[in-house]
Image: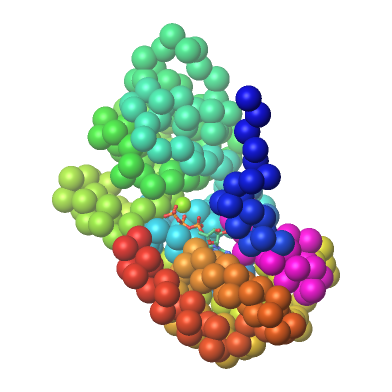
């Protein structure tokens, strides 16, 4: 028996919808939807917050505190980490130390998985058969060696840190406290400052949990709130995505770009509804594309005006409330 796919009303519905969206995209010169989610986001899509990025990097360089990038889901914590990771290897601290960076993006890790992920991220060798404490010890020894012999400090980025098993934290704490008293005795003046800086991310809830359950780390950690997108950054967010979908992102000029077919005041409406949260802004813009595409089919205009923006913002309000 064959399945008569061509007879399915559902598939017909989806195909019509896809064609409607496609027609809108073609009309504005886009090769795909500007607002689709990318598994591997492209850094050319990022709107930078230069001052905030500087404050992260400055904190790492001065070596006084660890960092907790704090923000709601979708606020851009991971994006900021990637930007800081990009900049750090090109910098040095006041003593002329360079930086070696590691990034642990996976969560839900047990003690041993965490230890292995850290070693992998810092390109430190270990044996699979080792216990987690042996792996972390190898990480500690190699970090000390890199500090002394290569004049390099280690910056370790850990995503959504609270989403790991509790035991995994103690490994982090050990690294956060390096050098140990014993090492200080062994190396004397050569080891008189912390050599590993942790840059962690998480929501406010998790920061509060860390304050109560891991005060030893929290006390030495600076929480930094990820800034919301202001209206001009929201405009850039839309502009970059449209340019990306048109294939013109490489000539994107942040001082002079177009957001057609979005009206500027439509973007303001959307950014207010999104409260400057980039993930929510993307969802809302995608909703606007759908409404605008229907309009385009009916009336021939691809515009996203404030009216559409309001309509979509209202429709999404309950959804956004639920995921917040
Ligand atoms: N500054 C930015 N410029 C452009 N896009 C951004 C920016 N910040 C975040 N985004 C986009 O918004 C979405 C959410 O960002 P990101 O994943 O960094 O947030 P998050 O806070 O790490 O979220 P989660 O809590 O889900 O891990 C991604 O699609 C990302 O590309
Ligand atoms: Mg993230």
**Residue 317 lies in the magenta stretch:** no
From where the camera sits, is residue 310 visible? Answer: yes
In this picture, is 119 found above or below 291? above
**Does the magenta portion include 34?**
yes
Lateral position of residue 200 relative to residue 22, left or right: left
Return the x and y of residue 209 as percentages of the image width and height: 21, 51
Which segment did they paint magenta? 20-39
Q: Is residue 324 visible?
A: no
Using the image as rendered, state which of residue 177 and residue 249 is in the foreground.
Answer: 249
Tell me if 148 is positioned left or right of 181 in this view. right
Q: Kindly identify the residue that appears in the image at 33 percent across and 42 percent down.
A: 163
Q: Residue 323: x and y, percent?
A: 35, 60
Majority secondary structure of the magenta segment?
loop
* Residue at x 58% of width, y 68% of height: 286
Total marks placed: 0
In the picture as drawn, the residue positioned furthest to the left comes out as: 212
Front one among 65 and 243: 243
Up/down of 161 relative to 279, above or below: above
Classify residue 127 as left or right of residue 24.
Answer: left
Give the vertical position of 16 relative to 85 (above or below): below
Q: Quadrant of the C terminus?
A: bottom left
Q: Quadrant of the N terminus?
A: top right
Q: Please name whichever residue, 23 or 286, is drawn nearer the observer in this view of the structure.
A: 23
Q: Position of residue 252 (x, y in %)?
A: 78, 72
Q: Is residue 248 left or right of residue 179?
A: right
């Amino acid at each position: 028996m064959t399945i008569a796919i061509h007879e399915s009303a559902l598939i017909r519905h989806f195909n019509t919808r896809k064609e409607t969206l496609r027609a809108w995209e073609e009309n504005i010169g886009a090769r795909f939807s500007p607002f689709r989610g990318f598994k591997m986001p492209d850094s050319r899509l990022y709107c930078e917050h230069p001052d905030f990025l500087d404050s992260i990097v400055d904190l790492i360089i001065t070596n006084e505190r660890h960092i907790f990038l704090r923000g709601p889901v979708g606020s851009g914590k991971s994006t900021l980490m990637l930007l800081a990771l990009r900049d750090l290897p090109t910098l040095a601290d006041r003593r002329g130390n360079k930086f070696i960076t590691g990034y642990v993006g996976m969560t839900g890790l047990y003690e041993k998985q965490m230890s292995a992920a850290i070693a992998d991220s810092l390109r430190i060798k270990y044996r699979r058969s080792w216990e987690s404490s042996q792996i972390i010890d190898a990480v500690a020894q190699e970090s000390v060696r890199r500090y002394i012999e290569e004049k390099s400090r280690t910056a370790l980025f850990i995503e959504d840190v609270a989403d790991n098993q509790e035991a995994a934290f103690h490994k982090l704490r050990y690294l956060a406290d390096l050098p140990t008293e014993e090492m200080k005795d062994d190396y004397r003046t050569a080891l008189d400052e912390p050599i590993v800086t942790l840059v962690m991310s998480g929501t406010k809830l998790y920061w509060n949990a860390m304050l109560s359950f891991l005060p030893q780390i929290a006390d030495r950690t600076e929480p930094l709130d990820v800034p919301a997108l202001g209206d001009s950054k929201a405009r850039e967010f839309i502009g970059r995505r449209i340019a990306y979908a048109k294939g013109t992102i490489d000539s994107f000029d942040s001082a002079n770009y177009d957001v057609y077919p979005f009206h500027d005041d439509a973007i303001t409406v959307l950014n207010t509804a999104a409260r400057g949260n980039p993930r929510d802004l993307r969802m809302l813009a995608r909703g606007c594309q759908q409404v605008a595409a229907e309009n385009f089919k009916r009336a021939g205009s691809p515009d996203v005006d404030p009216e559409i923006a309001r309509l979509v913002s209202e429709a999404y309000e309950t959804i956004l409330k639920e995921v917040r």
